[in-house]
Image: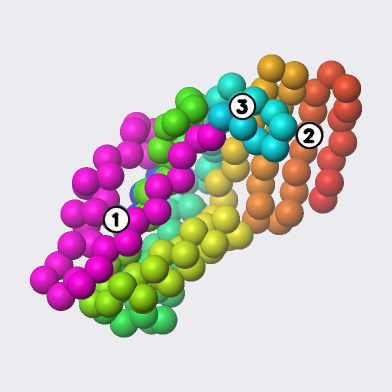
């Protein structure tokens, strides 16, 4: 299961994808929408993605994990669209025969997602908004006080 969806993520369905008889550990990561970003109160987030490429990249991450941690199984689901505070934005489940490998592979997955998968979020606050696209280190910032672009 490597997917980009617009509906809420079902954690039990993601976990079920990696369950198997030789799994001694299943480690999950659930990224949620937080209310405070630095000193600013977040109202909501908008996520966008280049979906066909994003799905392929998620599958590639799963392949990297299989090669690096033999016996590991991975499922990754990322939600796009408007998400409210507390909503689940991304879920990763990794199973493996041993817990150490499951923890390592899970952390590897989220770090790879943040650096290479074409998913962007726009943070909305009462006094501004910010597009975040980690893949190329791009950030666009727009509000009433300031407008700048960093590339």
Q: Mark 1 = which residue?
A: 1
Q: CA distance from mark 2 to mark 1?
A: 34 Å
Badge 1 element: loop
Tell me residue 77's x, y (percent).
37, 49
Tell me residue 25's x, y (percent).
25, 68
Q: Mark 3 = which residue?
A: 42
- The foreground one among 46 and 38 is 38
Q: Residue at x 55, y 25 (%)?
A: 44
Badge 3 element: strand
Q: Closer to the N terminus: mark 1 or mark 3?
A: 1
Q: Residue at x 41, y 64 (%)?
A: 106
Badge 2 element: strand
Q: Mark 2 = which residue?
A: 141
Q: Quadrant of the N terminus?
A: bottom left
Q: Residue at x 70, y 28 (%)?
A: 40
Camera-near label (1 vs 3) is 3
- In this picture, which residue range is highlighted in magenta? 5-34
């Amino acid at each position: 299961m490597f997917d980009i969806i617009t509906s809420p993520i079902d954690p039990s369905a993601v976990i079920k994808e990696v369950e198997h008889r030789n799994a001694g550990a299943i480690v999950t990561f659930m990224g949620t929408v937080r209310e405070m970003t630095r000193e600013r109160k977040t109202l909501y987030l908008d996520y966008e993605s280049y979906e066909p490429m994003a799905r392929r990249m998620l599958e590639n991450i799963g392949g990297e994990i299989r090669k690096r941690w033999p016996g590991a199984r991975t499922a990754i689901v990322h939600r796009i669209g408007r998400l409210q505070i507390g909503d689940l934005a991304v879920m990763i489940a990794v199973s493996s025969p041993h817990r150490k490998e499951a923890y390592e592979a899970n952390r590897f997955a989220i770090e790879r997602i943040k650096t290479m998968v074409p998913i962007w979020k726009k943070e909305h606050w009462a006094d501004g908004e910010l597009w975040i696209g980690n893949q190329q280190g791009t950030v666009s910032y727009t509000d009433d006080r300031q407008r700048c672009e960093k590339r």
